[in-house]
Image (cartoon, rainbow, N blue to C red):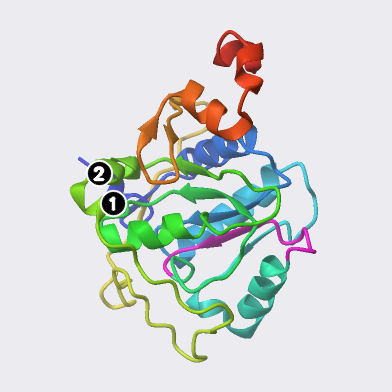
């Protein structure tokens, strides 16, 4: 029996990843900047390709991969992503590299396609979306791996993590991630790829649930969220469905 941590490491189902990508693209504003956290560098490449194949934008640099192996080209794409005056690239896929140390203030969406087992890393990833920017009142986490449970952990309310100074770049050369180390080629298990025979189909079921969280990391109702965001405006609507 495979668990979430096994997907895209020891087993790969492309149709499953395509389904998750399309759920994100259908729910999100595709013009907003986003970071997608993937299981490893190969998974980040797959997700990049799936996003570019299914997004409304047909710009080949709409979604790009920025990982340890992408070298100077990856650093160049990262700098362009950080430039708030530029809209391309719009989405970055990564594995460990961008969980911390990136000063991009206009990120509106964080997408989790891999488990986040460390509270420290979870705080750092969430921190990618908390940067202030003109007109940015909130950001959205698309959580496909139940990482939201960290919000209920007592450690979530611990001491805040110090952010790295703005403009500080990671040293060039081999990147050493702060999170779990990716296995080397000799350590990596053989990945199982599942492909369905012609004429065989499997339906992938999905369910979407939306929750709202305040600036101090506490769960709040949709009504409280709207009150915080728009003040008196929510009184014009009976409920969330009418607002939509």
Residue pushed farthest front?
232
**Dot 1 crowding, Cα within 10 Å, few <14, some 14–19, many 20+:** some
x, y percent for residue 157: 27, 51
In the picture provided, is 57 more to the left or to the right than 37?
right
Q: Is residue 109 above or below residue 158?
A: above
Query: Do labels 1 and 2 touch, CB within 8 Å?
Result: yes
Count of numbered labels shown in the rendering: 2
Q: Which mark is residue 80?
A: none
Tell me which residue sits at (79%, 64%) in the image: 85
Residue pushed farthest top?
238
**Dot 2 crowding, Cα within 10 Å, few <14, some 14–19, many 20+:** few
The answer to whether residue 1 of the structure is visible from this angle is yes
Q: In the image shown, does 57 or 186 lie closer to the viewer? A: 57
Residue pointed to by mark 2: 3
Tell me which residue sits at (39%, 58%) in the image: 39
x, y percent for residue 62: 73, 56
In the picture provided, is 90 more to the left or to the right than 240?
right
The region drawn magenta spans 84-96
């Amino acid at each position: 029996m495979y668990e979430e941590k096994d997907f895209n490491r020891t087993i790969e189902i492309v149709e499953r990843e395509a389904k998750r990508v399309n759920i994100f693209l259908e729910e999100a504003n595709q013009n907003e900047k986003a970071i997608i956290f993937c299981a490893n560098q190969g998974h980040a490449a797959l997700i990049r390709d799936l996003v570019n194949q299914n997004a409304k934008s047909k710009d080949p640099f709409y979604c790009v991969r920025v990982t340890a192996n992408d070298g100077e080209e990856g650093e160049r794409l990262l700098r362009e992503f950080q430039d708030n005056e530029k809209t391309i690239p719009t989405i970055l896929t990564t594995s460990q590299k961008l969980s911390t140390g990136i000063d991009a203030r206009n990120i509106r969406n964080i997408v989790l396609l891999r488990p986040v087992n460390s509270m420290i890393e979870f705080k750092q990833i969430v921190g990618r979306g908390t940067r202030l920017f003109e007109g940015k009142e909130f950001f959205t986490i698309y959580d496909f791996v139940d990482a939201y449970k960290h919000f209920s952990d007592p450690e979530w309310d611990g001491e805040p993590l110090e952010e790295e100074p703005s403009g500080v770049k990671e040293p060039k050369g081999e990147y050493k991630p702060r999170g779990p180390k990716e296995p080397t080629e000799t350590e990596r298990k053989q990945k199982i790829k599942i492909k369905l025979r012609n004429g065989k189909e499997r339906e992938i079921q999905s369910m979407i649930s939306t929750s709202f969280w305040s600036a101090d990391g506490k769960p709040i109702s949709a009504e409280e969220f709207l009150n915080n965001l728009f003040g008196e405006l929510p009184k014009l609507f009976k409920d969330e469905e009418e607002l939509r």
